[in-house]
Image: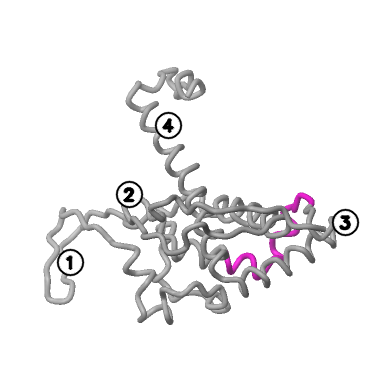
Amino acid sequence: MGGLMQMKDEQGKKLSNEEVVDNIVSLVIAGYESTTIATMWAVYHLAKSPVILAKLREENIAMSKSKGGSTSTSLMITHTDIPKMKYTAKVVEETIRMANIAPMVHRVANRDVDYRGYTIPKGWAVLVWLRSLHTDPNYYEDPLSFNPNRWDEPAKAGTYQVFGGGPRISAGNMLARLQVTIILHHLCVGYEWELLNPDAEINYLPHPRPVDGAAMAFRKLST
């Protein structure tokens, strides 16, 4: 916040209080809460999917050992390691597909649009419900199941909008994937966990999460 308050444009003009607040909200929600929610859902689904977790752990332990780490102690992975973690990447993609952290996007029709017998007049605001898109069985087989192997093939064009698309795609989309990858690496190499209330109901607004906050018990893996 201090940096934003002192920031000046090319003419030496500082941001207004409203602009500072608007940027802070964007940083907190888009730069912090989105990644923490994605991480929570990754750990949540892995707790319910022991076979997937075992495969993820196998890949990451192998990576850790190749760098000189032990079975339960991981070393810091680098940018050259990330492309080698193929299964981890699929787990991350499946997590953000199911999490739908940004459940919708807003657009404005720049012309009259005919859609399935309806007309959307120019200038009307349009809300695209992304959760419906990402759980549509026309695009994803058994869409409510957590299945990283579905990412053996890329999604059909236009059916995967977790970070938006086109010129308005989230600028932090690759950073978010990287952060979740690093956290999962250290968790699955060094820890095991279980959900305390695996049947907790889910609240979907403003962001999807279990009503109990996905309470979990973690234990350090023995060597």
User: Does 121 sit above or below residue 51?
Assistant: above
* Residue contact at pointers 2 and 4, CB within 8 angstroms: no
> x, y (%) of residue 142?
42, 80
Mark 4 or 1: in front is: 4
Mark 1 or 3: in front is: 3
> Image point 40% across, 58% down: which residue?
164
Q: Secondary structure at mark 1?
A: strand
- Taking the image as drawn, is residue 167 in sight? no
User: Does 97 sit above or below residue 75?
Assistant: below
Q: Is residue 85 left or right of residue 110?
A: right
The residue that mark 3 highlights is 68
Cα distance in 3D space between marks 4 and 3:
40 Å
Q: Secondary structure at mark 4?
A: helix
Cα distance in 3D space between marks 2 and 3:
43 Å
The residue that mark 2 highlights is 206
Give the residue type that dot 1 points to: Val
What is the number of the mark on residue 113? 1
Give the residue type that dot 2 points to: Pro
Q: Is residue 196 magenta?
A: no
Point out the image quarter for the C terminus: bottom right
Mark 2 or 1: in front is: 2
Q: Residues within 10 Å of mark 3 (few under 14, many from 20)?
A: few
> x, y (%) of residue 17?
35, 21
